[in-house]
Image (tube, rainbow, N blue to C red):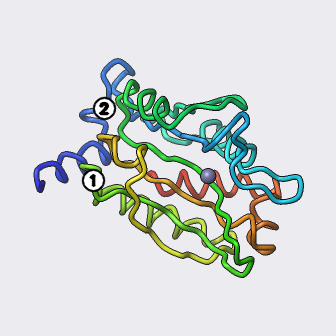
Amino acid sequence: MKKLLIFCSIILTTSLFANTLNDGKRIIVLDPGHGGVDGGVKKDDYQEKDIVLEISKLIKSRNPYKDTEFIILRNTDEQISNENRAKIIKSYEPDLVISIHVNSNIKSTVKGLEALVSPMNPCFEDSKLIAEKINKNLISLGFENLGTKESNTKILRDSSAPTVMIHIGHLSNNEDKAIVTNPKNYNTIADQILAALE
Ligand SMILES: [Zn+2]
């Protein structure tokens, strides 16, 4: 286990073992959640699938790292099963996977950022570290931080690279909704996520 963790750390901090098919670049797969008939969480006219796609595109277009290539799992409003998502992610042999979501809760008072990582992922510790960094950076937008929690959902568990699922606030909470549905915040959200990947 220890060996695996060290291996994961090396992959993340240098491009030494990065996919050689891509000029030795660090490959980061962005997985905008949901799509197609699966809109994810909804509030008023807002749908999670649209918000996370917009933010994913900005992360890719604002990428400041010359040694890093971002691949967006879906570039359009299409539905991909979790089974296929996991398969596609594997095919890229990524160094990191970030699945991007927005949360919802039946209690409208529940608000804040929440990240999920899987203890069954061989890069669990690295995943946790990155998740915590992303949450910490996104606080600057006015979110509370509910922290990093464990989940064994397929995408997190099946990946052999560090994999995090982030939730950028709760659409069911008015304060979070005001932040995450305002496109003026999207460049900052993208930049704060990027800054966590240095
Ligand atoms: Zn979601």
Type of amino acid at the residue the image marks with label 1 = Met
Which residue is under mark 1? 120
Q: Is residue 73 above or below residue 50?
A: above
Instruction: Name which quarter of the figure residue 131 lies in.
Output: bottom left
Mark 2 or mark 1, which is nearer the start of the sequence? 2
Which residue is drawn at the image coordinates 68% and 65% (left, top)? 104
The residue sitting at 60% across, 44% down in the picture is 33
> Separation of disc 1 and disc 2 at Cα?
22 Å
In the displayed image of the protein, which residue is found farthest to the right? 45
- State the residue in front, 56 or 13: 56
Other-residue count near label 2 (Cα within 10 Å), few / some / many at <14 / 14–19 / ≥20: many
**Other residues around mark 1 within 10 Å, as few (<14) / some (14–19) / many (≥20):** some
Numbered label attached to residue 18: 2
Q: Is residue 26 left or right of residue 3?
A: right
Q: Nearer the viewer, mark 1 or mark 2?
A: 1
Q: Is residue 197 left or right of residue 144?
A: left
Local secondary structure at mark 2 = loop
Q: Position of residue 173 (x, y in %)?
A: 75, 73
